[in-house]
Amino acid sequence: MDKKGEEHQFFFAMEAILGILVAGILILTAANFDSISNINKIYAQEDLKLLIETIQASPGAIEYNYKLKEMYEVQIQEEDIKVTTNNNLFNGYSYYNLTLRKEQGENTIQVKKNA
């Protein structure tokens, strides 16, 4: 029996599996580029800062829905807004609404996460 032929088949199968794995990782990364980039996270954090300042300065009652990816967690405290990333594989493909609400005559903003 020729052992070289069996070794070549084994290495070919391993190369095929490794090639499929690498191609799958590259396709998932290309489809969800937020998982490797901080640009959209920084953009969302700066945008929320400006939005909250605008809502606080405006008169009357306001309700605003801000659409975010599921992979972003928002923590809003007094003057500090933090956007953190949860790198779950499928959270980059679904969205949720962050509802910002201010009642007339108040300076506080209520924040609610709606799926």
Image (tube, rainbow, N blue to C red):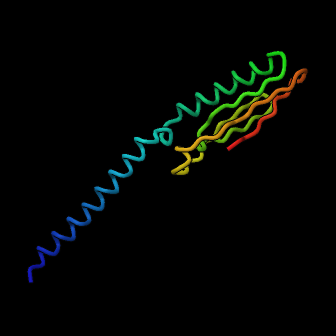
**Figure disc tally:** 0
Q: Is residue 115 left or right of residue 58?
A: left
Q: Nearer the viewer, residue 98 or 76?
A: 98
Between 75 and 56, the one nearer to me in the picture: 56
Q: Is residue 12 above or below residue 76?
A: below
Picture quarter with the C terminus:
top right
Quarter-wise, where is residue 74 in the image?
top right
Residue 53 appears at what percent x and percent y?
75, 20
Q: Residue furthest left?
A: 2
- The answer to whether 94 is drawn above or below residue 4 in the figure is above
Q: Quadrant of the N terminus?
A: bottom left
Which residue, as the protein is rendered here, is positioned at the far bottom? Answer: 1
Q: In front: 55, or 17?
A: 55
Query: Which image quadrant is residue 12 in?
Result: bottom left
The quadrant holding residue 54 is top right
Residue at 26 percent of width and 65 percent of height: 14
- Whether residue 58 is situated above or below residue 8 in the rendered picture: above
Toward the viewer: 4 or 28?
Answer: 28
Image: 86 above or below 64: below
Q: Is residue 16 left or right of residue 40?
A: left
Residue 68 left/right relative to 89 = right
User: Residue 73 placed where, x, y %?
Assistant: 66, 42
Q: Name the residue located 16 percent from the left edge and 75 percent from the top edge.
A: 6
> Which percent across, then down, holds residue 40?
55, 32
Q: Residue at x 80, y 16 (%)?
A: 57
